[in-house]
Amino acid sequence: MLLLFLAALYIASCKGRQEDEMIVYNKNSAALSKIDSATETKIITEMPATFGIGRKATNAEIKAWDIDVRPDGKGLPYGSGNATEGKVIFTQKCAACHGKEGEGGAYARLVGAMGDTVKAKTIGNYWPWSTTLFDYIRRTMPYNMPGSLKDDEVYSLTAYLLYRNKIIDSTKNMDAKSLPKVVMPARQYYVDDDRRGGPEIR
Amino acid sequence: MERPKEEKEYSFNDSKKINRRLLLGSVAASAVIALVKTTTGQFVPAAVAKPASAPPDPTKVQGPPPGAVGTRSPFEQLAKKTSDTSSRTPLQSLYGTITPSDLHFERHHGGVPVIDPTAYKLVIHGMVKKPMTFTLNDLKRFPSVSRIAFLECSGNFRSGKQEMTPQEICGLTSQSEWTGVMLSTLFREVGASPKATWFLAEGSDAAVMTRSIPMGKGWNDAMIAYGQNGEALRPQQGYPARLFLPGWEGNTNVKWIRRIEVSDQPFMTREETSKYTENIKDGKIRQFSFDMDARSIITFPAYPVQLDKGWVEIKGLAWSGRGKILRVEVSVDAGKKWYPATLQEPVLDKAHTRFRFLWKWNGNETEIMSRAIDETGYTQPTLQQLIDARGTDMGGYHLNPITAWIIKRDGSVLFKPEKWK
């Protein structure tokens, strides 16, 4: 066995650069030898870890698409805004669909503080993380011009909607530091899926 | 028609009229036209077949020569049922288990994007040894796999009136043969960290759809699919490439996938917090409900079929996101007695399974229904069992109740809607 192995090594080294090697993958190969001596083709029984297909991603390429924001604030950009500025932008760019002050219109109601009489699910009574608001608005709103807002505008709109849902006051500045610290009223109600299959209905 | 709250709140349908008028008059008018186009335009079948007419004797005229692309018989008027947020598969019109690709259900959050396959790329980065970019050609060079599996939206339940078809009640499920590269193969290529626990999947539609997925699913059976039923994915299913997670709620199967970020925590995107979560008992909100529980539905006889007395082959579909269908049981006496149905082989893992049951109807009024049992020992519940488990405030996602059809003496078949709110 050891001899065979050494022989294989010898042949492999004679062949020079590894990339020139002929290799076949055959999971079920019962061949004792890992080298087919007739053709000098190497036989492997385990898939290669990598195939050398694809290229290294450039930093610019990643940066252009990496727009997500995590609950710990990772991904939040430079910039800031508050509710007063947010109200102006909301009136211009959002109110046509979500109502004058976010009370709902053709599309979703966005305002309804925890504990008030609003039945709809809102940022105030249902959203568990403040960072989601920034991520979502920047990613896809306004619906008719997705991805068109500047980071400062997104901070302002986020501040405005948090204020309207009675989560922060109107003067509070939202930025990469302060936004992740805002605790959403609904967070305490969230639990992980407990369905597991089996006889119990959950 | 009663609809789960989650959908109602942001459905385009409920306020279509007000909405158009309002939007056309608004500052956003130009962009709004596009919105109207994507929401209604795409649902109009491209070529609505003309009323079919056949020659009196087809043996006396030459037919058209072989064509470049086959067509459906003009006598078969199959169509999805569209709303402004989704379109539904005509389950009652299909045979076997594969959904023709043009009848696969649709639910998008930013319309269907047009993506040039030569410009397409998938970036994988984050907790990896080597962040990498793959072109569509790259993806196709990797070892490929094919598997037949269903894909179901977790909001797939409608009720409210007797005149509802299987398509209207549960047409947000479809099945295809998916072909692609295992995500585990790509994870090895980039050297995904063993410490990573979640990854973010992001689409390149106008919603830039994002979902956080546990790495375990990624290593286990996730695919980056580029093939559907023998051809490239349809744009409506994610052309040129999508994430496919067998058995998991439709929305997690991110279409038009452009980016995967490997991480050690979930990202808490809007689609896994504000949406695709459900109220359960004690004011709790259930999150990351990935697996689609076992379900079945009789697709014949069903509304609006007119049934004749005598032998009837009851037919339907059963499926489970947790494995294979073990058994389907049918009742023809409103749930008093249950009998095993015949399952069409092969029964596949996480796949629509066809069941059949022979029955001689004596013309009396009755109710027929089916329930699926999967290999975990789970039995498809009644709506009441779901309410008992989740409370009367239960949300509209992951509802898989037994569906009953009422058969009247005159042979008409009606859905039996049940109320819970």
Image: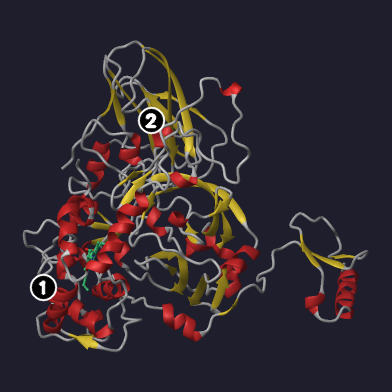
Going by the image, does A54 lie left or right of B11? Answer: right
Q: Split into 4 quadrants, where in the image is the N terminus of chain B?
A: top left
Residue A202 point in image, percent of width and height: 30, 46
Q: Which residue is mark 1?
A: A164
Going by the image, does B23 lie left or right of B133? Answer: left
Residue A11 point in image, percent of width and height: 89, 75
Q: Which residue is mark 2?
A: B298
Total count of labels: 2
Q: Residue furthest left?
A: A117
Q: Are marks 2 and 1 on the same chain?
A: no
Residue A126 lies in what quarter of the image? Answer: bottom left
Q: Secondary structure at mark 2?
A: strand
Q: Residue at horizontal 35%, vertical 67%?
A: B206
Residue A79 point in image, percent of width and height: 26, 88
Residue B230 point in image, percent of width and height: 59, 49
Q: Which chain does the numbered disc 2 sit on?
A: B
In the rendered structure, are the residues bearing label 2 and label 1 in contact, judged by CB atoms less than 8 Å apart?
no
Going by the image, does B43 lie left or right of B58? Answer: left
Q: Residue at horizontal 80%, vertical 56%?
A: A29
Amino acid found under the numbered disc labelled 2: Ile
What sort of colour scheme is used for the picture?
Answer: secondary structure
